[in-house]
Image (tube, rainbow, N blue to C red):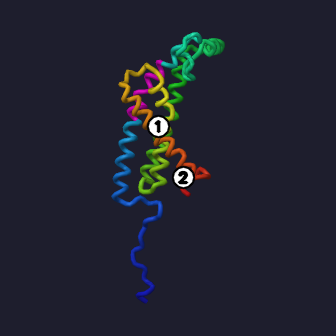
């Protein structure tokens, strides 16, 4: 009869992070997320300033895709939208989508941070919330008064975002978070 008693089974799975490594990964994750959050906060006013200014096509600096050309200004005027209104609409949409990704990433972190998949999915959502668009604005314009080293670090922080993005689709080819 004693042979049929199952002693405490290990609840670890193949995808579960070992406890010592988990602490290290969570610390690295936390540092990256704090950096992403600071960059996100810094980029919002600069993004607004950039979007409310139009550039002239003859200006050699006007080649960036984030600059608003005079043709776009004419199109906005046709629909009775000012540049300030255009900037507010875009920044509001940017912040709403980012907040959705931040909240989703933090919920996944809260419920699944003991697995590689949970850490990967939460970091992907948070890095897309902050890094997806704010790094473009932080690095590509002069409206945020940042030291050059901060802009270089922001560029380097994009690499884990793309790595997590590619690993996410390799790990979850059907898009489901729980494989």
Q: Which mark is residue 25?
A: none
Q: Position of residue 101 (x, y in %)?
A: 50, 40
Q: Tell me the residue that label 1 is attached to.
A: 158
Can residue 161 be found in the magenta stretch? no
User: Between 42 and 64, which is closer to the camera in this rendering?
Assistant: 64
User: In the rendered structure, which segment of residues is drawn in magenta?
Assistant: 37-49
User: Between 52 and 161, which is closer to the camera in this rendering?
Assistant: 161
Quarter of the view holding residue 85? top right
Point out the image quarter for the C terminus: bottom right
Q: Which mark is residue 177?
A: 2
Q: Secondary structure under badge 1?
A: helix
Q: Are marks 2 and 1 in contact (CB under 8 Å)?
A: no
Q: Is residue 144 above or below residue 173?
A: above
Can residue 44 be found in the magenta stretch? yes
Q: Position of residue 3 (x, y in %)?
A: 43, 87
From the viewer's perspective, is 73 left or right of 112?
A: right
From the viewer's perspective, is 147 left or right of 50?
A: left
Q: Residue furthest front?
A: 60
Between disc 2 and disc 1, the foreground one is 1
User: Between 175 and 104, which is closer to the camera in this rendering?
Assistant: 175
Q: Position of residue 71 (x, y in %)?
A: 63, 13
Q: Secondary structure under badge 2?
A: loop
User: Between 110 and 129, which is closer to the camera in this rendering?
Assistant: 129
N-terminal-most mark, 2 or 1: 1
| Disc 2 residue crowd, few under 14, some 14–19, many 20+, Cα 10 Å | some
């Amino acid at each position: 009869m004693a042979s049929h008693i199952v002693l405490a089974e290990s609840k670890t799975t193949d995808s579960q992070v070992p406890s010592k490594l988990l602490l290290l990964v969570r610390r690295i994750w936390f540092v990256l997320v704090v950096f992403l959050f600071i960059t996100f906060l810094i980029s919002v006013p600069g993004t607004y300033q950039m979007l409310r200014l139009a550039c002239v096509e003859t200006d050699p600096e006007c080649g960036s895709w984030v600059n608003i050309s005079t043709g776009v200004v004419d199109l906005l005027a046709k629909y009775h939208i000012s540049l300030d209104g255009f900037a507010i609409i875009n920044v509001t949409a940017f912040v709403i989508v980012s907040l959705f990704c931040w909240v989703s990433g933090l919920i996944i972190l809260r419920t699944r941070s003991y697995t590689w998949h949970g850490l990967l999915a939460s970091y992907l959502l948070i890095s897309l919330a902050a890094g997806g668009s704010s790094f473009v604005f932080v690095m590509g314009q002069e409206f945020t008064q940042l030291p050059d080293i901060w802009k270089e670090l922001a560029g380097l922080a994009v690499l884990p975002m793309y790595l997590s993005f590619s690993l996410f689709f390799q790990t979850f080819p059907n898009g489901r978070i729980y494989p």
